[in-house]
Image (spheres, helix red, strand yellow):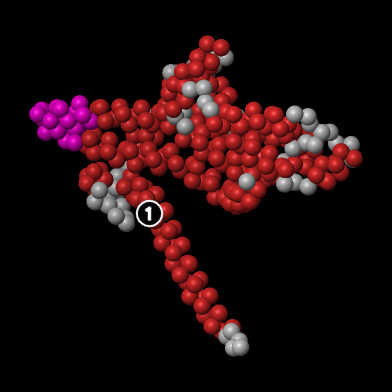
Amino acid sequence: MSKRNPNHIKNGSSVATAIVYAILIVLALICIYPVWYVIIISVSEPIAARTMDVFLLPKGFYFGSYAQVVEDSQIWVSYGNTILYAVSCTIGMLIVCAMAAYPLTSPYMRGKRLMSFFILIPMYFSGGLIPQFILMSNYLHLYDTRWAIIFPGIVSMWYIILVRTFFMSIDEALRESARIDGANNYQILLHVYVPTSKPIMAVIAIYTLVAQWNSWYAAMIYLPNASKQPLQLYLRRMLILQEKVAQQQSGTQGGTSEDGEAAMLAALSAEQLRYTMIVVATLPIMLVYPFLQKYFVKGVMVGSLKG
C-alpha cells in the first residue's frame, strides 16, 4: 500500500487556502463596496450623484448636504434621543434577561417549566397594534412619553430563552460553591453567572443596540412631539420635506434663471441627501461594532451549539 506524500498534502492545502482567501476577498468586496459607494456618492458633486456617474472614487467634492444636515439643531436633539433610547434599552435588556433567565436555571425553583412555557407564548402570538396602542395610551399612560420606547424595548422573550440556554451550560458546581461560601442568589448572578456569560451578553447588547438605533416605527406611533423623537424618524421627516421643497421649486422653473438654478440645485441636493442621511445614521454603529465583534462571533457560535 503506497504511503501518502506529505508534500502533496501541503501543496494541496496551499491551493485550497489560496482559493479560500480569494473567495473571502471577493465576499468582503461585495460587502464593503455598497458602504463605500454610499460614502463617495454623498461627497460627490450633486449632478454626479443624480446621474449615478460615480464608481470607485468621488467625482468632485460637495459637502452641501452634510452642511444642511449638521446646521439643523433639531438633528442633535434627535441624536441625543436615539442615544438615550439605545443605551437605556440595551442596559435594561441585559438586566431583565439576566434576572429572568437565572431563576429558570435554578434547581430549587418550582414551576420553572410552566414559566418557561408562558415565556414561549409571546414569541409566537402577538396582541396586535391596536390592543397594544390602547394598552400603552389608556392603561399605562405612556403615550407621548419616552417610556413608550424604553419600556417595551427592555423585554424580549427570545433573548430570555437565549440567556437561559447559556446559563444552563455553566457548571452547577460554581453555583453550589458560591452558595457554600455564603453568597445569595443576587451575588451568584452578579459575580458568577454574568462574568462567565460575556459572549451571550455581547450578542444581546449589539442586537438591541442596532435594533433601537434603527427603530422609528414605534416612535412614529407613540411620540407626536418632535423633541422626543429619535434620529431615524427625524431623518425620514426631513427627507420627505426636502422632496416636497424640491418639487415646489421645480414648479417655479418658468421664472428667472436664478430661480431655475436654485430649483435644480435643490432637486439634486434632495437626491444626494438620501446618501448623506445613510452615512450620518449608520456611522456611530459602524464605529461601535468592531469593539464588540470578538464577543459577538463567540456568542453566536456558543448559542448555535447549545441551541
Residue 257 forms part of the magenta stretch:
yes
Q: Is residue 50 visible?
A: yes
Residue 296 location (% of width, % of height): 59, 48
Residue 46 location (% of width, % of height): 25, 43
Residue on which the image places disc 1: 33
Q: Hey, which residue is sitting farthest front in the picture?
A: 1
Residue name at image x 56 percent, y 12 percent: 139
Residue name at image x 71 percent, y 32 percent: 113
Above or below for 243 versus 222: below
Residue nearest the viewer, comparing 88 with 46: 88
Q: Tell me the quarter of the picture where residue 73 sits.
A: top left
Residue nearest the viewer, comparing 1 with 233: 1
Q: Which residues are magenta?
A: 246-264
* Amino acid type of the residue tagged 1 in the rendering: Tyr
Badge 1 element: helix
Above or below for 126 versus 139: below
Q: Hey, which residue is sitting farthest bottom in the picture?
A: 2
Q: Is residue 95 visible?
A: no
Q: Tell me the quarter of the picture where residue 275 sits.
A: top left
By secondary structure, the bulk of the magenta-drawn segment is best described as helix
Residue 16 location (% of width, % of height): 49, 72
Q: Tell me the quarter of the picture where residue 71 sits.
A: top left
Residue 19 location (% of width, % of height): 45, 70
Please indicate whether residue 47 sits to the left or right of residue 207 in the image: left
Above or below for 262 versus 192: above
Mark 1: few, some, or many residues within 10 Å (few <14, many ≥20)? few
Residue 49 forms part of the magenta stretch:
no
